[in-house]
């Protein structure tokens, strides 16, 4: 393996950011570099390409933490891939990263977050039929205690959706408030059913991967784990409509900037996610181009147009 150490994203020069933002080998890293260059908030992170060692200590020192989040990146995603986003101690990073690197995937090590105490999660989707033609912006939101993976991989319906038609992504025009269309809860069974699905996903995926529960645990075990640690956001009020309404204008502005800066000028569907943490702190995750996310032979490519993944 080579000994060159990766550089944290927030330490890259403008030239290095531009190079990373143009490198299509690592789609997540590419979009993180693009967002950081646009002054949008993103996690500080390091990219570990295949053939390199996972120098977790470097990023840990840069961020002043002893835990890091691990994600995978590289190439076109298949239907089955590593579910990243969990945070681990520095001593656990190496063994977990080794398998991903051996499979030819890059590893992104990022500063840690607490995915159990989020205040607001929003999935932004930009659609248009073609270059120069008006499109639409859709915001799907979940409130306290949920996270991005619930919307992107957990198949949990949003509590609130805001939709805007006739958006010209090449010429900025501030939307009027009455142009937004807000839709409320569309989850069969209401909030109780949505919360149960969140707990089931935590039990079988998130907490199992983190070593907190075993794969046989159920929703009741996930609820007990959260309550024991004082992570009560999921069980409290869900003022999601008000929170989304306050941020809709800012999210529109950011979506416009991202669409305008997107390297693929002929994009048809772009998506990104936005999180407001408990600290409070807000940031964007990676930007996804729907036509480049999945392999052409994968059925998920067709499903993507109906549901952002």
Image (cartoon, rainbow, N blue to C red):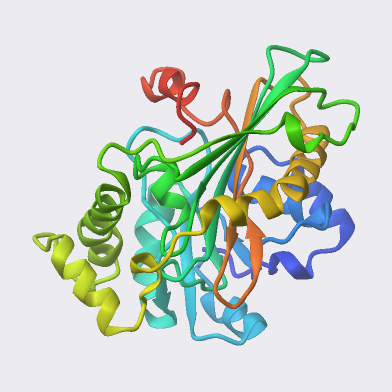
Where does residue 63 sit, x and y in percent of width and height? Answer: 63, 81
In the image as oriented, which residue stretches furthest toward the front? 178
Relative to 32, 168 lies left or right: right
- Residue 26 appearing in the image: no
Where does residue 241 sit, x and y in percent of width and height? Answer: 56, 50
Residue that appears at 71% across and 41% down = 23
Relative to 254, 151 lies left or right: left
**92 or 102, which is in the foreground?**
92
Where does residue 295 sit, x and y in percent of width and height? Answer: 46, 25
Which image quadrant is residue 159 in? top left
Residue that appears at 82% across and 35% down = 176
**49 or 28, which is in the foreground?**
28
Vertical comparison of 47 with 8: above or below:
above
**272 or 73, which is in the foreground?**
272
Which image quadrant is residue 259 in? top right
Residue that appears at 70% across and 53% down = 247
Residue that appears at 14% across and 66% down = 220
Number of labels in the image equals 0
């Amino acid at each position: 393996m080579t000994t060159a150490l990766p550089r944290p994203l927030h330490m890259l020069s403008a030239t290095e950011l531009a190079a990373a933002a143009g490198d299509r080998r690592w789609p997540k890293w590419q979009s993180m570099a693009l967002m950081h260059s646009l002054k949008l908030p993103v996690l500080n992170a390091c990219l570990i390409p295949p053939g390199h060692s996972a120098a977790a200590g470097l990023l840990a020192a840069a961020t002043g933490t002893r835990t890091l989040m691990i994600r995978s990146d590289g190439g076109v995603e298949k239907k089955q891939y590593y579910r990243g986003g969990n945070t681990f101690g520095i001593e656990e990073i190496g063994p977990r990263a080794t398998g991903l690197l051996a499979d030819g995937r890059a590893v992104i090590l990022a500063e840690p977050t607490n995915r159990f105490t989020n205040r607001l999660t929003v999935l932004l989707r930009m659609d248009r039929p073609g270059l120069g033609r008006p499109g639409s912006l859709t915001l799907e939101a979940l409130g306290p205690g949920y996270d991005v993976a619930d919307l992107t991989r957990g198949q949990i319906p949003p509590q609130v959706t805001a939709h805007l038609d006739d958006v010209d992504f090449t010429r900025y025009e501030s939307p009027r408030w009455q142009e937004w269309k807000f839709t409320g809860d569309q989850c069969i069974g209401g909030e109780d059913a949505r919360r149960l699905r969140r707990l089931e996903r935590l039990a079988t995926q998130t907490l199992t991967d983190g070593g907190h529960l075993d794969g046989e645990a159920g929703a009741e075990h996930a609820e007990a784990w959260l309550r024991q640690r004082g992570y009560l956001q999921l069980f409290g009020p869900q003022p999601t409509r008000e929170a989304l309404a306050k941020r809709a204008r800012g999210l529109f502005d950011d979506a416009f900037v991202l669409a305008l800066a997107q390297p693929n000028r002929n994009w048809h569907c772009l998506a990104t996610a936005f999180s407001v943490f408990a600290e409070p702190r807000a940031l964007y995750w990676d930007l996804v181009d729907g036509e480049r996310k999945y392999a052409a032979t994968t059925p998920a490519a067709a499903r993507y147009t109906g549901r952002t993944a």
